[in-house]
Image (tube, grey):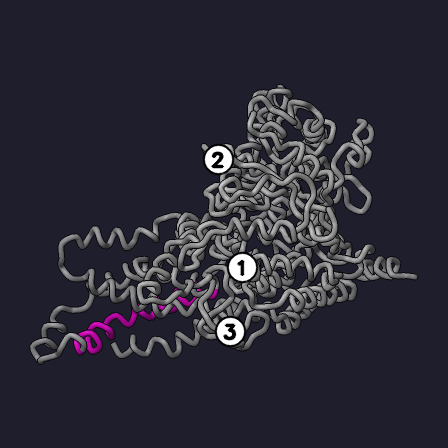
Amino acid sequence: MRTRAAKLAPLGFLAPNLLGFLVFTAWPVVYSLIASFSNWNLQKTVSSRFVGVQNYAEIFGDSKFWLSFVNTAYLMLGIPVSIALSLWVAILLNRKMPGNATLKALLFLPSVTSGVAIMILWKALYNPDFGPINSAIEGIFHWFGLNTHGPQWLLSTQNPLSLDVEKVGLAHKQFGVGARDALNIMGIWGAIGGTNMLLYLAGLTNVPEELLEAAQLDGAGKMALFWRITWPQLAPTTFFIVIMSIIGGLQGGFETAKVMTNGGPAGTTTTMAFYIYKKAFEEYRIGYASAVSWILFAFVLGFTLLNWKFGNRGENLA
Amino acid sequence: MLGALLLLSVVAWYFQPPTTVAGKTILIRVSDNNPLRQAQVDLFNKLNPTLQMELDPSDNGVDKVIVQSMGGVGPDLFDSFSPLQLSAYVQSDIAMDMTHELKKRGIDITKDCFKGMMSTCIYQGRVYGVPTNIAADGIWFHRDLLRAAGIPDHKGPWTWAEFIPIAQKLTKRDANGKPLCYGFYFDWWNFPHFLKGFGAHIYSPDGTKCVLDSPESIAAVQLMHDLVYKYKVSSSPVEEASMSTAGGFGSGSVSVFAEKHAATALGGRWWLAQLRDYKGLETGVMESPYGTVRDFHAYGRCTLVNKEGHNIQDAIKGLLYMAGPEYNNLVNDQADGICAFIKYTKSKQFLFNPKYPKETDNAIWLDIAAHSSGDETSPFISGQVVNDMITEQLDLVKADQKSPLDAMHDVAAEVNQQIQKNLQEDPALMDKYKAATRP
């Protein structure tokens, strides 16, 4: 029979971490839930009081919040592209070839470089008048005899889906390429060689060689090998990457907005995370921002549950 | 949970940073990340051997200062860069009312300083700080580019109608129409400069209504739009999108101008602090053109004392230093804008500094500052909210997605709607509004 001390010992070892979690994570989370039902404002001219579900009701009629949701969703369009490219690169790097390790290190470089430095670099690349991207695009156009200017990138509200800027909907004048696409391209560039690639590389090493060899002996081609053997075997990795990417995507966009665009032009790069920051620390409406945070949490939870229910079918098959 | 919080609070209290080091009282000053600021702090420490002022640029920002001050760990001194920031500090009960303290020491900023800085220091009739510099923008130009185009330097007041043909002559494009050098470069965040030049206002005199849909405002924004799309002399600046990482408002524009991507540009004397690092430039300054009213937008810093600070008396000494000759002469010397105290701009040392013999335009800067006025505020709405609303509409104008007329009508409607919403939520504000609108 275990002594009382032996029973308490694990708790003692856990205590430092648990204490930190309770004080710095659990308590603020609970407190933000309480705050979301108040009109707490950092400006003392407005006295704090309980307002019930008023903040939540206001969010549903707040067009700027819904625009930030659309922006967040738009910026998540890059996720499947980056996942697919990460897998492709991982498959290429999984082959035995000279310079493999160097290539891996180079591709992983954006993940270990300062995000702010990268963003400032991309800002310069996206300069519509003097940036190298537009210089290259315009050079190609001129080579074909077309006198066309490149996109305005970070200055433009346009997007290929023609999403309107001032309300949730479509507007044909918004058709084009703009700031959100610029951020998506940058995000894909950074994500291709990042942790997703490493996870896929790890996943690929776990694909049983004997399965591949047996399939090859049965006459399976490269595509059949990938779709019938590799892809199902990678399902748990893909499932994990998709869930983490969706959670990250829903919570993302803060750094790029803060460093590159300040949420503009015309709010087109204001994601939900940046919107929370603006409400809390620019307008000082902590109560309202807390309510938005809980709505964001509901979205994250909802998407994760949906993914859990429908997304792991491949994993079960595998 | 509460026990754990209490325990950690005791631990944090025990390990809190010392307020004195080697017998010197430490004063924390939050300001922007600017090398000039460090030299200003160093001079204070030299003049006050018992005090150690430390610059904390990493905590610069209204949100950080307010949150830290509320938590009892705020700085002793911090900067307000606009009336909207001042109102946020005052309404958060962070800024100390310095009206009597300054009066007691014979400092009357309403008489001693440029009037353009008043709204950044005075809120609802109370003085909260000392203006620590001022900027009002003129037209920077490259002398060699003007000379090559056969354009003489312009002296004195002039209008946009006179300036635009010159900017058109200075704009250079390649055979494909790609810009090589813009005739005129400006930042869209500087929209108040254009508004003032047309006599436009953001609010009605009592602050109860947004009047950005006035013909004057529309004309000002129309000009900004036309400089890009009709006259094609300006670019839509991409560098202005984020200011903080680039080192301050408009610092990207300084680079654009210094690298001769623009022949002329709208900017302040503070550009010199960067331009001095570029070798071989031949730059000059002209007064900015105006639309109908010779009024320019003034902006700058006002330093405030934290009401919740631990060393209020010493912080006041820091504030008084910024009203004194050593600090103000240093500001002029560094070209950290112009010092805000008029008497320190009268010296020969400022007008013709032997250290910088090529800088002969300081009299022009003074004239511009003398004809400048500060930003407007309304007690019925947060300036930050209004600024965001204006910026979103201007972004659409800048991208040629919306006409200035529609944008200004929409922003005025949006601001007025928000004012009404604020009144519904705050009975005290409603009383104030009723008092202001009572016939």
Residue that extends furthest to the front in the rendered view of this protein: B150
Q: Residue at x 80, y 37 (%)?
A: B110
| In the rendered image, residues at marks 1 and 2 fall on the same chain | no
Q: Is residue A214 magenta?
A: no
Instruction: Give the total number of marks visible in the rendering.
Output: 3
Q: Which circle marks residue B303 in the picture?
A: none
Residue carrying label 1: A263
Chain identity of mark 1: A
Chain identity of mark 3: A
Q: Amino acid at mark 3?
A: Leu
Residue carrying label 3: A163
Measure how far apart labels 1 and 2 are at the Cα level: 35 Å
Residue carrying label 2: B281
Q: Nearer the viewer, residue A28 or B384?
A: B384
Considering only vertical position in the picture, is B383 above or below B421? Answer: above
Measure how far apart labels 3 and 2 are at the Cα level: 45 Å
